[in-house]
Image: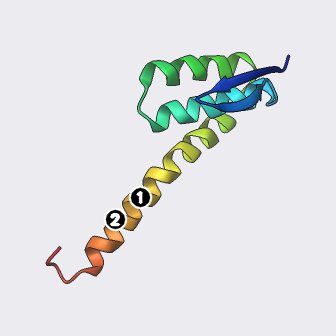
Amino acid sequence: MVKQVELFNVQYKEGSLEPKTAELIKFAVNLAIDHKHGAKLHLGRAREVGATEDEIWEAVAYAMRPVAAKVRNFAKEIVSTDGNG
């Protein structure tokens, strides 16, 4: 069921996403922000609505991408200097 919701002045229709997709997104976001309780909660809910292990691990990879990119970019900056940082 779709319902109109507001979060910090952002209007959206909660329920527009399929439940499995929504739970996988919430799981990935909680992983990315290091929120253990939320990650466990949404992992369980994702499994309850039929998420496969492949889908779960894909969500994990998506959670890792921004951090991995940040580390890569920082490393390139540091490594490309002549050692004087």
**Left or right of residue 33, residue 80 in this image:** left
Say above or below: 39 vs 56: above
Q: In terms of image quadrants, where is residue 26? A: top right
Q: Quadrant of the C terminus?
A: bottom left
Between 52 and 79, the one lying in front of the other is 79
The residue depicted at 62 percent of the width and 26 percent of the height is: 7
Neighbours of disc 2 within 10 Å: few (<14), some (14-19), many (20+) = few
| Residue that carries the numbered disc 1 in the rendered image | 70
**Left or right of residue 32, residue 10 in this image:** right
Kindly state the secondary structure of the residue where label 2 is placed: helix
Image position, residue 24 (x, y; %): 65, 31
**Left or right of residue 76, residue 8 in this image:** right
Q: In terms of image quadrants, where is residue 80? A: bottom left
Image position, residue 67 (x, y; %): 44, 51
The residue depicted at 24 percent of the width and 80 percent of the height is: 81
Between 73 and 49, the one lying in front of the other is 73
Tell me how far mark 1 sits from mark 2, CA to CA.
6 Å
Image position, residue 32 (x, y; %): 47, 38
Between 36 and 33, the one lying in front of the other is 33
Q: In the image, which disc is placed on residue 42? A: none
Contact? badges 1 and 2 (CB < 8 Å): yes
Amino acid beneath label 1: Lys
| Residue that carries the numbered disc 2 in the rendered image | 74
Image position, residue 57 (x, y; %): 60, 39
Q: Quadrant of the N terminus?
A: top right
Kindly state the secondary structure of the residue where label 1 is placed: helix
Amino acid beneath label 2: Phe
